[in-house]
């Protein structure tokens, strides 16, 4: 069975999580190969204090040109969007990156320091729909102090409904705290990936409860994502196999994301 990973990190600065995780290209590709994962999505982190955004996007373009199995998402910097022409400048930059081959946008409300429904994100949600590229939103309470609420589904729910022409991928299944809310985000234009949280999801929820939520979302709306190399890839794969009934394994591990990506020219 092929496994495609919807959430992988590799940064040009080479480190993440306070420097404790090696995210250099070589290390990440080596880890993927060890788990026989050929194809995946590389996603940036929207944290300008850790990884300068222009450098990140240049790197991502280099990666996708070097490795056709990787789909690259664009990083964003909203810190100057309030300047004169700031919205237009940001939009033009995204259009340029899409022309150069990036095929999605990552939005991390905590690292951007805003709520998921902030005005600064609205031009991005709208433009993604116009350009027909998906937006992946970090939906998980954890990050810098005091930002638990930034990616609360109460903000994201408004945005996925207002920008219904844009396709969204909700990351981390709500990071356990918001797991119960996932069915409320489950509109026609919304998909889900399970990165980073499977160990604690299994610890805090019963199998019965997890499956009830999965069934409500629908197995056709779910992708496997790991958050590698921040987490143990093997554990993510094994737990997801356990949580999803076997008849849907091919769907969640590869078929769904291949079908979803067709529309955006992923892995052409
Ligand atoms: Zn991540």
Image: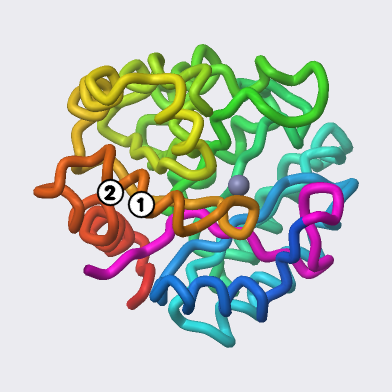
Per the image, is 6 magenta?
Answer: yes
Q: Nearer the viewer, residue 140 or 72?
A: 140
Q: Residue furthest left?
A: 247
CA distance for labels 1 and 2: 5 Å
Give the number of marks. Answer: 2
In this figure, which residue is indicated by the disc labeled 1?
A: 238
Q: How many neighbours does mark 2 have within 10 angstroms: few (below 14), some (14-19), or many (20 or more)?
A: some
Outermost residue, bottom side: 66
Secondary element type, mark 2: helix
Quadrant containing the C terminus is: bottom left
Instruction: Tell me where residue 2 appears, x and y as whole percent.
Output: 27, 69
Tell me the number on the disc at residue 241. Answer: 2
**Residue 134 located within the stretch drawn in magenta:** no
Q: Position of residue 231 (x, y in %)?
A: 59, 51
**Can you say whether 104 is above or below 213 in the image?**
below
Classify 24 as above or below 141.
below
The magenta segment is 1-20
Left or right: residue 29 compared with residue 84: left
Task: Determine the secondary structure under disc 1.
Answer: helix
Residue 146 horizontal side relative to residue 268, left or right: right
Report which quarter residue 161 is drawn in. Answer: top left
Proximity of marks 1 and 2: CB atoms separated by less than 8 Å: yes
Q: Give the left or right position of residue 204, taking residue 62 as reference.
A: left
Could you tell me which residue is drawn at 75 percent across and 36 percent down? 111
Residue at the image point whose x is 45% and y is 58% from the top = 234
Residue 117 spot, x, y in % from top left: 60, 21
């Amino acid at each position: 069975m092929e496994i495609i990973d919807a959430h992988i990190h590799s940064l040009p600065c080479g480190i993440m999580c306070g420097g404790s995780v090696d995210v250099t290209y070589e290390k990440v590709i080596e880890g993927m190969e060890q788990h026989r994962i050929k194809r995946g999505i590389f996603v940036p982190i929207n944290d300008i204090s850790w990884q300068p955004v222009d450098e990140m996007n240049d790197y991502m373009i280099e990666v996708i040109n070097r490795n056709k199995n990787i789909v690259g998402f664009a990083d964003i910097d909203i810190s100057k969007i309030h300047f004169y022409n700031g919205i237009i400048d940001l939009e033009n930059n995204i259009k340029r990156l899409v022309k150069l081959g990036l095929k999605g946008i990552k939005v991390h409300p905590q690292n951007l320091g805003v709520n998921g429904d902030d005005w600064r994100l609205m031009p991005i949600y709208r433009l993604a729909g116009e350009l027909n590229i998906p937006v992946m939103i970090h939906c998980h309470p954890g990050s810098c102090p005091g930002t638990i609420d930034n990616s609360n589904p109460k903000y994201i729910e408004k945005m996925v409904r207002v920008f219904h022409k844009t396709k969204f991928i909700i990351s981390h299944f709500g990071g356990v705290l918001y797991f119960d809310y996932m069915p409320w985000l489950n509109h026609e234009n919304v998909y889900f990936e399970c990165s980073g949280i499977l160990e604690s999801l299994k610890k805090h929820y019963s199998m019965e409860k997890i499956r009830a939520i999965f069934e409500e979302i629908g197995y056709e709306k779910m992708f496997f994502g790991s958050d590698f190399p921040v987490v143990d890839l093997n554990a993510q794969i094994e737990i997801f196999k356990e949580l999803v009934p076997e008849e849907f394994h091919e769907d969640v591990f590869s078929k769904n994301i291949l079908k979803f990506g067709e529309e955006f020219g992923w892995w052409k």
